[in-house]
Image: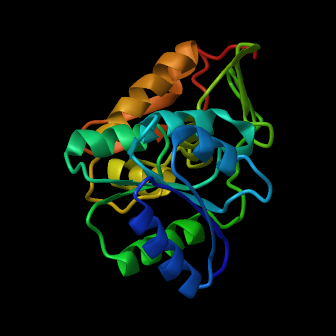
Amino acid sequence: MSGLILIVEDELDLVATLEFALEREGFQTRSATTVDTGFTAATTSPAPDLILLDLMLPDGSGTNLCKRLRAEAATRETPIIMMTAKSEEVDRVVGFEVGADDYVVKPFSVRELALRIKAVLRRRKPTEAPTVPSRFGRLRVDTGGHRVWIDGQEVVFTALEFRLLTTLIARRGRVQTRDVLLNDVWGVQPGITTRTVDTHVRRLRKKLGAAAIYVETLRGVGYRFTAEVPDEKEGAP
């Protein structure tokens, strides 16, 4: 597997180790040591295929850089793996909530990290597009343009929220467990944490407004996007 990996890390010895190991795996590498240079490196052509992002940088937080990258059109869908010495569950949850695809705690095995990179890249390979209707009751969805309208008013969703919404719509009528959503939307293996799924569903419902009734909760099981529009609640988008 080949590709360009951007390493945003201020420990130069670790950068050198990662560059050597990843280049042996067939990857090209680019590096940056701060939030600002990391943002520039991430948005410079050719674009990186994946970003390794340290949580603690000299001029700011990797979490804030992750937010900036997710807000930028050019890097909105670029996979990000966070690297940090922090191991508390809350740190992992925050990392996933701002858009990270995976999370590794220092010290880590470079070989394991290379395998994680390959796994994330495999999950991000284009696959057959899910069937997402352009209109569903109060909703109008433009998957290519990453846009959503509710009752004719455009509502802005983050990349993660948009993936969660379109995944639920594409699987309408079928129950999605928290583990399944965590794996398919966040791109992480089940068993890490599912609390972040509930948090994002709450935020999603808040943004959906009147269309929130389409997202059903099955206690102790998961969530389901209704198979059909409830007649009494249907509006004209």
Residue nearest the observer in this picture, 114 or 205: 114
Examine the image and state in which quarter residue 89 appears. top left
Decide which of 18, 114 is in the foreground and name it.
18
Q: Residue at x 47, y 52 (%)?
A: 53
Q: Is residue 117 above or below residue 136?
A: below
Name above or below for residue 131 compared with residue 123: above
Q: In the image, is 1 to the left or to the right of 135?
A: left
Q: How many marks?
A: 0
Residue 127 position in % (x across, y down):
69, 66
Q: Is residue 166 visible?
A: no
Is 121 placed left or right of 95 in the picture? right
| Residue 71 visible within the image | yes
Q: Nearer the viewer, residue 47 or 211?
A: 47
Most extreme residue toward the bottom is 24
As displayed, is residue 175 above or below residue 146? below
- Give the residue drawn at x 71%, y 64%: 128
Quarter of the C terminus within the rendering: top right
Q: Position of residue 125 (x, y in %)?
A: 66, 67
Q: Left or right: 55 with respect to 28?
A: left
**Extreme front residue here?**
12
Q: Residue at (32%, 41%) from the top-left corner?
A: 93
Q: Depth check: give the residue in front, 149 or 44.
A: 44
**Residue at coordinates 40% horizontally, 67% vertically from top-left?**
13
Write down the quadrant of residue 183 in the picture.
Answer: bottom left
Q: Is residue 1 above or below residue 30?
A: below
The quarter of the rendered structure image containing the N terminus is bottom right
Residue 98 percent coordinates (x, y): 46, 37
- The colour scheme is rainbow
